[in-house]
């Protein structure tokens, strides 16, 4: 049985699915698709913590599905801009855990991950599947992936 490491960029999927489809990701369906016929070695969801109850409920849903949830505090800068991404954390975990799995599933459309995917494939000989919203997934990331899985249709919940 194939093994899989799942790395889920929650903010990226949330905002891109809302922009492209005006719908939310169905994380149960994403899990089912990513794990079909595979044994999960590790599944990590990376999110920003704003401390509200609705967000805590969502994080608990992710945990119930099988994800380990990693949180960073939301940081509002003095100029009104916000900071809160997990690019470095996702990258470190991918490199640290790639040897434990046959397939790495990266659920993000962020083009900054293209060099990571190239490294995982070239240096570690890993198969890397990228799950992303097609209209908002960087071409470089799609080209780097072993396989691109569009987050649309059955991977989305009903109208928001």
Image (spheres, rainbow, N blue to C red):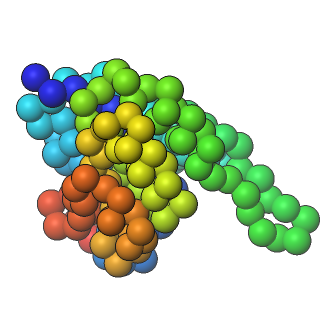
Which residue is painted at 30% across and 72% down in the image? 134
Residue that lies at the very extreme toward the front in this rendered image: 123
Q: Position of residue 158 (x, y in %)?
A: 23, 65
Q: Looking at the image, can residue 5 be seen?
A: yes
Left or right of residue 119, residue 3 in this image: left
Q: Position of residue 38 (x, y in %)?
A: 15, 29
Which residue is painted at 50% across and 26% down in the image? 96
Q: Position of residue 17 (x, y in %)?
A: 37, 68
Seen from the viewer's position, the closer of residues 32 and 109 is: 109
Q: Looking at the image, can residue 156 be seen?
A: no
* Number of dots carrying numbers: 0
Which residue is painted at 45% across and 45% down in the image? 119
The image quadrant where one finds the C terminus is bottom left
Q: Position of residue 117 (x, y in %)?
A: 41, 50
Left or right of residue 96, residue 80 in this image: right
The image quadrant where one finds the N terminus is top left
Q: Is residue 114 above or below residue 136?
A: above
Q: Is residue 6 above or below residue 17?
A: above
Which residue is painted at 24% across and 30% down in the image? 102
Seen from the viewer's position, the closer of residues 37 and 26 is: 37
Seen from the viewer's position, the closer of residues 95 and 108 is: 95
Left or right of residue 157, residue 99 in this image: right
Residue that lies at the very extreme toward the right in this rendered image: 78
Seen from the viewer's position, the closer of residues 66 and 52 is: 66
Rendered image quadrant of residue 103: top left
């Amino acid at each position: 049985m194939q093994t899989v490491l799942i790395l889920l960029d929650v903010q990226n999927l949330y905002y891109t699915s809302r922009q492209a489809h005006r719908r939310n990701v169905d994380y149960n369906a994403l899990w089912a698709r990513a794990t079909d016929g595979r044994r999960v070695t590790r599944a990590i969801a990376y999110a920003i913590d704003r401390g509200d109850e609705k967000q805590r409920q969502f994080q608990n849903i992710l945990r119930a599905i099988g994800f380990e949830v990693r949180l960073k505090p939301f940081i509002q800068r003095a100029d009104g801009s916000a900071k809160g991404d997990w690019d470095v954390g996702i990258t470190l975990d991918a490199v640290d855990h790639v040897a434990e799995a046959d397939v790495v599933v990266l659920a993000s459309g962020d083009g900054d991950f293209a060099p990571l995917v190239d490294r995982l494939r070239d240096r570690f000989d890993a198969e890397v599947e990228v799950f992303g919203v097609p209209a908002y997934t960087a071409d470089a990331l799609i080209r780097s992936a072993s396989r691109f899985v569009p987050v649309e249709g059955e991977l989305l919940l009903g109208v928001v």
